[in-house]
Amino acid sequence: MLKRSYQICARCVMDTTDPEIKFDAAGHCNHCTEFLATRDKFRYQGAESDRKLNQIVEEIKKAGSGRDYDCIIGLSGGIDSSYLSYVAKEKGLRILSVYLDNGWSSEEAVLNIKNITKKLGIDYESYVLDWEEFKDLQLSFLKAAVPEAETPTDMAIPAAMHHFAAKYNIKYILTGGNFATEGILPKSWHYNAKDLKYFNFIQKTFGKKILKKFPTFGYQREMYFKILKGVKMVYPLNYVPFAKDDAVALLKDKFDWTYYGGKHYESKYTRFIQSYYLYEKFGIDYRRATLSSEICIGKTVRADAVEQLKSKPFNPTEVEAEKHYIAKKFGISKDEFGKILNSPAKWYWNYPNDDKKLGFIYDTYRRIFNKEKLASF
């Protein structure tokens, strides 16, 4: 892909750190344009949203009749999944909480999970990844020098959720994803975690281990669960007046919930990747996506967002300690870790992938199976 001159959106704060960004004649980018065009389908609309959510809850309860649980929630200890657990419990759903243990959770996140499950009376299952395989896989993606350093976790999460869905014959998986706060995220910043061609090539090329225990989850596995087993993904937070600040206040009051410092920072590794690795290696500042979504919904003024982005997303006095911690956990020297971090940046299109194939498959699926009813996006 050819290099281009720097440009920032005139409406939000997305810029050419997304190499695939497009601008119209007014200087507005494709991200905020698409967000605004789609937003009304997913934002909270008062009584109508309440009615739809209640309808979905009844469908979930009906599907769970005669079984131990109505639904699964992947609980990370973060804001979205914690608040979702509260909402679902208030609606009378029988929840199985599933925690993916990949070895990186912060102490705050683990304590949050314990408090929420205990105080809400939610049953809890943990899916523990094999550490030797997983750290080799994470190192493979770092050595590949792509932004998708979190693909191993992002693949393991749905694999774990569907594992327990099969074990307990549960038909609904509830997720804390929501359009209002996560509606903008460039594909180039985090390519499809379900592309097994891309995934397998990176592990075969850069890894040292043959994966025997890691739970892969590609489109074929997903379609098996969706079409043949009837497992549905639902996004309930699209149906409630969800505001992060209010959610945090409620969680702190009811569950002694502790904040961990940033979006998705409930994981120590995610904190390092999103705040330092992506910024220093690719110029990617994840705050741009969040702030751009907030600008579009009127929560943040663009000028304030621009001001926030003048500072770096990481603390320079802490990052060296983080590098030392991660290198030690990976079992490599800090110098070797530094060489990996400083290698030339690559992107998903630099490696074999199934981007076009997957685009066709998922577009076809959405046309055949109308997902708007369940607010899947």
Image (spheres, helix red, strand yellow):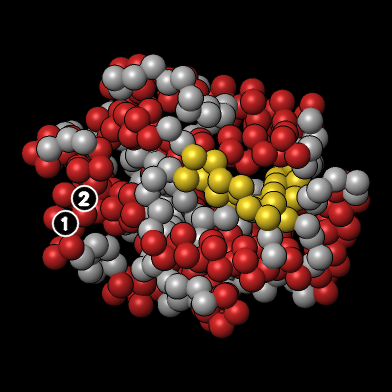
**From the viewer's perspective, is 347 left or right of 371?**
left
Look at the numbered disc 2 and give the secondary structure of its residue: helix
Closest to the observer: 117 or 2?
A: 117
Closest to the observer: 82 or 201?
A: 82
**From the viewer's perspective, is 67 left or right of 235?**
right
Look at the numbered disc 1 and give the secondary structure of its residue: helix
Which amino acid lies under the numbered mark 1 shown in the image of this protein? Ala
x and y percentages locating residue 197 in the rendered image:
47, 19
State the count of labels: 2
Asked if residue 213 can be seen in this view, the reply is yes
The quadrant the N terminus occupies is top left
Task: State yes or no: discs 1 and 2 in contact (Cβ < 8 Å).
Answer: yes
x and y percentages locating residue 20 in the rendered image:
39, 41
Q: Residue at x 81, y 65 (%)?
A: 92
Closest to the observer: 220 or 43?
A: 220
Does 225 sit above or below residue 257? above
**From the viewer's perspective, is 67 left or right of 116?**
right
Q: Which residue is mark 2?
A: 325
Q: Residue at x 58, y 38 (%)?
A: 160
Q: Which residue is mark 1?
A: 321
Which amino acid lies under the numbered mark 2 shown in the image of this protein? Tyr
Asked if residue 235 can be seen in this view, the reply is no
Does 348 sit above or below residue 260? above
Q: Residues within 10 Å of mark 1 (few under 14, many from 20)?
A: few
Does 171 sit above or below residue 228? below
CA gap, disc 1 to disc 2?
6 Å
Residue 223: quarter of image: top right
Q: Residue at x 39, y 45 (%)?
A: 103
x and y percentages locating residue 309 in the rendered image:
29, 67
Q: Residues within 10 Å of mark 2 (few under 14, many from 20)?
A: some
Does 129 sit above or below residue 266? above
